[in-house]
Amino acid sequence: MKTLFDKIWDAHVVTTVKDGPTQLYIDRHLCHEVTSPQAFSGLRARGLNVFRPEQTLLTADHNIPTTGQDKPIQDEVSRFQVDTLAKNAREFGLTYYGLRNSRNGIVHVIGPENGFTQPGMTIVCGDSHTSTHGAFGAIAFGIGTSEVEMVLSSQCVLQTRPKTMRVNFRGTLQQGVSAKDMALYMIWQLTTGGATGYFVEYAGEAIRNLTMEQRMTLCNLSIEMGARGGLIAPDETTYDYLREREFAPKGERWDKAMAYWKTLKSDDDAVFDKEVTFDASQIKPMITYGTNPGMGMPIDGSIPELSDIDEAGKISFEKSLKYMGFEPGQKLAGKPIDYVFLGSCTNGRIEDFRLFTQYVKGKKKAGNVTAWLVPGSWQVRRQIEAEGLDKILEEAGFELRQPGCSACLAMNDDKVPAGKYAVSTSNRNFEGRQGPGARTILASPLVAAAAAVSGKITAP
């Protein structure tokens, strides 16, 4: 009578403190330049080494530029952070995919594409969107810098066991509706605090029909409704994706791994602390209108009226609309936009670029739009070029950039100017997230493509 979460968690418990946290063993530890420097300094101060270096992987992604990567990073703070990560990797003997490394890319893109992410694992990173890796049937969650140090030194972390929640998506998605739309719909319905304290398992026909990359998009956004993480039971889609990837098991080890992976599903009589069901056929292409991912609506919908907002939320609702320059009851379809961003750990994979390219093929980018198309890794970029997508994009007036987190967050050169509207395939639309005063409208790659071509918010 165990859930998938229970099975993986219980297999990784080292000890449990009475009335306290669990000491959980960690299979994979991912690090980037932003949340790791103090952790490595802590190891030095205590005279410690990394306990199991082969289980840790480092990459530079947040601070790196997405043009001119063959030159030194211009911004001093960014350059220092990336140089510090490289120095820590050398000193502690860790695998590091730095700038110009053929495997470099966003941490939550390169883990899966290299087979470092596998079913049944516990995976952590000093980054909230670590929940992405749950798409493989893994317990994956973000940790703080002090916990990064804990994992580096002991390969364990102290965690309070979360409650379990299952979100079922019954039925099939309409054409043009993606995993990003499913996620924005779910957060709109459940709110940004609707899954606080829970680890979510996604199930149902619509989930089983998703590709691995779409599953990653959905799990990536689990954190935006307050969940500790999200996961999906592995199946043939998972195994087909992993087979032959660099760090995936080979030969007899593969057969042994498969025998275990096939046990990774919730028992038929498993009981969840909370269960929610959505009809996937009712979901339309979604956009956000406010300053958190829960402030979403169908692209043909209207911003709620003030009278529809509960008393406790009215002040933040009004503040949010003021920042965005919108009015209660306003429709956003047809609203002119300034920027389009395709990329991030949410939508920076090859399928996202295929979808975007398919839409813009034979069309032209609108003159009023600045478009940043940023692959999630060099592997994705090479695939874009191998499939000739870059040529189609070029013909339509788009330029392909180099990999990195880019305009998902204002930690590098790709900042949206104050007051400008960006239709973004990233994960957060907080005030200043894409640059001081930037106004972010979250959307799927297809909605972003339609906006890039029409110059306004348009149903694809």
Image: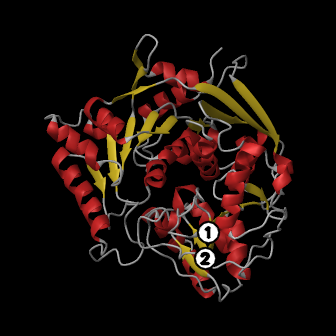
* Residue 300: x %, y % from top left: 84, 65
Q: Residues within 10 Å of mark 2 (few under 14, many from 20)?
A: some
Q: Which residue is mark 2?
A: 420
Q: How many marks?
A: 2
Type of amino acid under label 2: Lys
Residue found at x 79% / y 45%:
310
Q: Counting residues from the N terminus, which is met first, the one under dot 1 or under dot 2? A: 2
As drawn, which residue projects farthest toward the left? 47
Q: Which quarter of the rendering shows the N terminus?
A: top right
Q: Which quarter of the rendering shows the C terminus?
A: bottom right
Residue 449 left/right relative to 76 = right
Residue 228 to residue 373: above or below = above
Q: Which residue is mark 1?
A: 439
Type of amino acid under label 1: Arg
* Residue 123: x %, y % from top left: 44, 37
Front residue (pair 296, 182): 296
User: SS class of the residue under badge 2?
Assistant: loop
As drawn, which residue projects farthest toward the bottom? 367
Determine contact: label 1, label 2, CB under 8 Å.
yes
* Residue 167: x %, y % from top left: 72, 35
Residue found at x 32% / y 30%:
155
The image quadrant that residue 275 belongs to is: top right
